[in-house]
Amino acid sequence: MPAREAHQPITINCPHCGGESILADACARWNVETQEWELSTVYDDKTCADCGIEVSAEERSVQEGA
Ligand SMILES: [Zn+2]
């Protein structure tokens, strides 16, 4: 399996509790054709659902087999 760093899976973690219950501020746009909300923009602001505060989320690469 070739190393594809660009497609390396990551998790988004809270720096306070270490959890992965991170919510990102985003904009969704209604698509009339699919009748579904489509994610339009994801902003940098992240909130930890567990801590209930805005955090600067940490990205960690997923260690497969670890
Ligand atoms: Zn947290």
Image (cartoon, grey):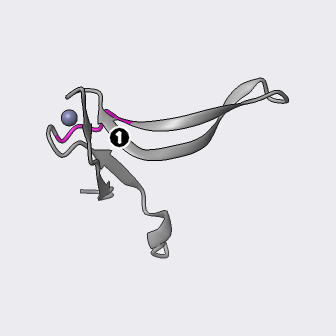
Q: Position of residue 1 (x, y in %)?
A: 48, 72
Near mark 1 (Cα within 10 A), the count class, few <14, some 14-19 or many ≥20, is some
Task: Point out the residue furthest to the right here.
Answer: 33
Classify 45 as above or below 5. above
Label 1, on which residue?
A: 46
Position of residue 52 in the picture relative to residue 42 (left or right):
left
- Is residue 57 magenta-colored? no
Q: For the stretch drawn in magenta, what is the main secondary structure?
A: loop
Residue in the picture at 51% in, 37% down: 26
Residue in the picture at 48% in, 69% down: 6
Number of callouts = 1
Q: Position of residue 41 (x, y in %)?
A: 57, 44
Classify 1 as above or below 61. below
Task: Point out the residue furthest to the top here.
Answer: 35
Task: Point out the residue furthest to the left here.
Answer: 16
Residue in the picture at 82% in, 27% down: 32
Residue in the picture at 31% in, 35% down: 47
Comparing 58 with 52, the one in front is 52
Position of residue 10 in the picture relative to residue 31 (left or right):
left
Position of residue 22 in the picture relative to residue 19 (left or right):
right
Instruction: State the SS at label 1.
Output: strand
Position of residue 9 in the picture relative to residue 12 (left or right):
right
Q: Position of residue 19 (x, y in %)?
A: 23, 37
For the magenta stretch, what is the residue range? Answer: 18-23
Classify 59 as above or below 17. below
Q: Position of residue 44 (x, y in %)?
A: 41, 48
Quadrant of the snapshot with the C terminus? bottom left
* Mark 1 close to ligand 1, CB under 8 Å: no
Q: Amino acid at mark 1?
A: Lys
Ligand 1 falls in which quarter?
A: top left
